[in-house]
Image (cartoon, rainbow, N blue to C red):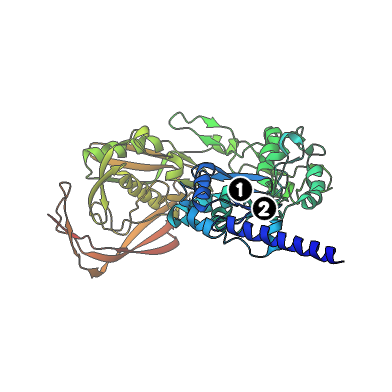
Amino acid sequence: MKKAVLAGAGIVVGIGVLYGADLLLTQGQVPRGATVGGVEIGGMDPSEAQALLEREIDPSAPVEVQAGDLRSSFNPAASGVMPDWQATIDGAGKQALNPITRVRSFFSTYEIPVTSTVDEALLRPQVDRIRAELSPEPVEAELNLAGGKVNVDPQPANGQKVEGVEQALIEQWPEGVELEPEVTHPELDQKAVEKALPAAEQAVSSPYVIHGRDADGVIPPERMAEVVSFERLEPKINVEAAQHIFEEGLGPTERPLRNAKVSYPSMEVTPHSDGVSIEWEATLKGFDPTTDQPREREAVYKDEKATYTTEMAQQASFDDVVGEFTTGGYSDASGVNIARVAQMVNGAFVAPGETFSLNGYTGPRGTAQGFVESGVILNGRADKAVGGGISQFATTLYNAAYFAGMQDVAHTPHSYYISRYPAGREATVYEGAIDLQFKNDSPNPVIIQTSAGGGQVTVKLLGVKTVNVESVNGGRWAYTSPQVMQVSGSNCTPSSGAQGFSTSDTRIIKNLSGAEISRETQTTVYDPQPIVRCS
């Protein structure tokens, strides 16, 4: 018994001696089992540990950043993250005094987080970049019908987002950074695709046919993508595109309405043609190829009879001047434009019931059509523009139609009074914006005859005279005074200005027996022309 006690005491003393020796030998060393970035520095002198870490861990080497299946990388040193090895080693603490802990340290390791200094200005852009690279948005599914097939492109896919990127980069960079992503799901997922598929499959199930008169309009499955698209998996029907495709086959079954006309000066008659047109709104009512509606339907036609026939034109007479007017006093450059537009309009035929549009008849009036730059009035002062002077022709035509008793459909007086025109009985035009239009509301056709030269332009309407027209001016009132306009530049032209005023014109139409048919008064307000002073 005594021997056993002595033996036990000897063991305890031995352990104590070993513990004391270990405590003495490891004094000042990094705690045993300590690692930094996978590098074992436990049991080392701090200076040796620092030297080892400096050799083994390079802050300028690329570090992989992982989040789920996605990868990115960054360079710690270039990103403003530099290790403080002394502080890192100090963070390991001291050797444990607990004998059990000291024994365990022979058989286990533990990681010490690296302590780093951080330059936020350099690190922040890298954090934002990595977060963006590792946080893709979910992919929303899309449908299309390219090639006459139902295509799911792109397929739906989950996205993800990551948080805590900055802290993880700072703390984990020596071993590689691993982030735990949060999965994000698309709104338009596979379930949504399956819900949308029947409509898409129906759209390309077979051709869509519209039967016309001796022809068909067809949308084959391979062209259905031009008509049906999907926005957030919802079908959108482009009825206008469908009409264009159907018109490719049905167009020949239509015929434009064309009244007979008489060409001047040959007096040759162009025959009339009754019109046939498809009423597309009625034909395509309810059109939706994504549903199970019948895929064949009949075109709805509208037949229109010409209002002025070949027989009428053959019997027409143009022996009378039913209205005419002449103006003059324009510049040479304006004369070029006036002569050009007069040439374009000369011989225009206006059947009974038809409306003549100056802009519509001539089309563009630019340099390509032979027009030149000439004087215009802009904001009350002289300026230049291509086509200057055309308003003088418009005024002349307006007056000729006025005295022919034509119905005034659209005319716009000048803003400022121009003395060579009759006050309250003149018109301006501007391509694409201001037009001159009159309707032939007489029972007979008219031909517009024009001539320009010698500083004058004349417009005559030839036909059958049935009325006499009188113009009565109502005088001038409500005068307004001009304002001074200071203008700089070499193109400035001084002007003494002119008063503005109001005036009226009354048109009295009588039949050839002298009986009054109508009386109409129009009031025109002219702005004052500014006094232009050049500087």
Disc number placed over residue 40 in the picture, else none: 1
Query: Could you tell me which secondary element the residue under label 2 belongs to?
Result: loop
Q: Quadrant of the C terminus?
A: bottom left
Residue 276 in view of the camera: no
Numbered label tally: 2
Residue pointed to by mark 2: 109
Instruction: Give the CA distance from mark 1 to mark 2.
Output: 8 Å
What is the quadrant of residue 379 in the picture?
bottom left
Residue 272 in view of the camera: yes
What is the quadrant of residue 532 in the picture?
bottom left
In screen coordinates, is 264 left or right of 473? right
- CB-based contact (under 8 Å), mark 1 and mark 2: yes
N-term mark: 1 or 2? 1
Amino acid type assigned to the residue bearing label 2 in the image: Thr
Which residue is drawn at the image coordinates 67% and 60% (left, top)?
17
Circle 1 Cα neighbour tier, 10 Å, few/some/many (<14 / 14–19 / ≥20): some
In screen coordinates, is 444 left or right of 106? left
Rendered location of residue 47, percent (x, y): 49, 50
In this rendering, the answer to whether 307 lies above or below 411 is: above
Rendered location of residue 24, percent (x, y): 58, 58
Amino acid type assigned to the residue bearing label 1 in the image: Glu
Q: In this orientation, which residue lies closer to the viewer: 202 or 398?
A: 202
Q: In this orientation, which residue lies closer to the viewer: 52 or 479?
A: 52
- Farthest left residue in view: 535
